Amino acid sequence: MTFGAKALNEIDILNEFRSCDALLEGHFILSSGRHSMQFLQCARLLMQPARAAKMAEAFTAKVPQNIRRNIDIVVSPAMGGVIVGHEVGRALGVEAIFLERPEGTFELRRGFHLEPGQKVLMMEDVVTTGLSSREAIQAIQEAGGDVIAAGALVDRSNGVAQFDVPFYPLVTLDVPSYAPDQIPAELAAIPASKPGSRKA
């Protein structure tokens, strides 16, 4: 673990996002259909292994020591959480596995399993509403794990995401989004693009 590394502040972290076009500014249609002036694509941030490791180390440094030292394993929901979960596991010196949702419900596959009572950090890339994170936490608990904390590189929920365990985002982005019939004039004046991972 490299917790002695120089801490990154939010400006440093957002500059990392911007430097690799992971944080875009303009007019974007989100996968939910809502419109926003900013768009996050964490895969762009994580595609460079050294940068992914740097962000994971910055994240683990933010988790209180009394929680950090009790984490036995990191579990992430696929797809977005896989890389960051792996890197956070590396930074913590513990195993990292992931959940999949082949038929609409998260489950452990590929021979992954949890020991009864194993203490888990549930790790996401981006939290928007918190719904998928809560579903992941439920799946972990049903598999026998004890979720002691949730984490994310980015919390863009504007305070909506709530969990029954402590939640530690590396950075918080309070960016409003708008229904198609409520777009402000200044945003509507910019041509919209849909850069998300889901097909329209």
Image: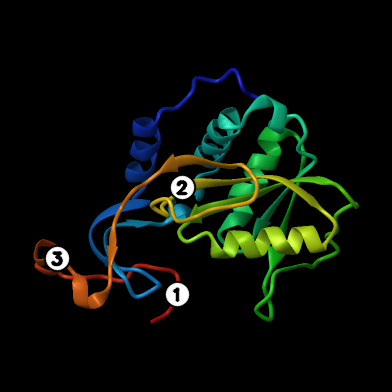
Q: Is residue 1 visible?
A: no
In the rendered image of this protein, does residue 149 appear above or below residue 193? above
Which of label 1 and label 2 is nearer to you?
2
Q: Is residue 156 visible?
A: yes
Q: Amino acid at mark 2?
A: Val
For the residues marked 3 and 2, what is the alpha-carbon distance in whole angstroms? 25 Å
- Label 2 crowd bin: few (<14), some (14–19), many (20+), radius 10 Å: some
Residue 48, disc: none
- Of the residues under marks 1 and 3, which one precedes in the sequence? 3
Which of label 3 and label 2 is nearer to you?
3
Q: Amino acid at mark 1?
A: Arg
Q: Secondary structure at mark 2?
A: strand
Which percent across, then down, holds residue 163?
59, 52
Q: Which quarter of the image is occupied by the C terminus?
A: bottom left
In the picture of the structure, the residue carrying the numbered disc 3 is 184
Seen from the viewer's position, the closer of residues 139 and 6 is: 139
In the picture of the structure, the residue carrying the numbered disc 1 is 198
- Label 1 crowd bin: few (<14), some (14–19), many (20+), radius 10 Å: few
Which percent across, then down, holds residue 169?
51, 42
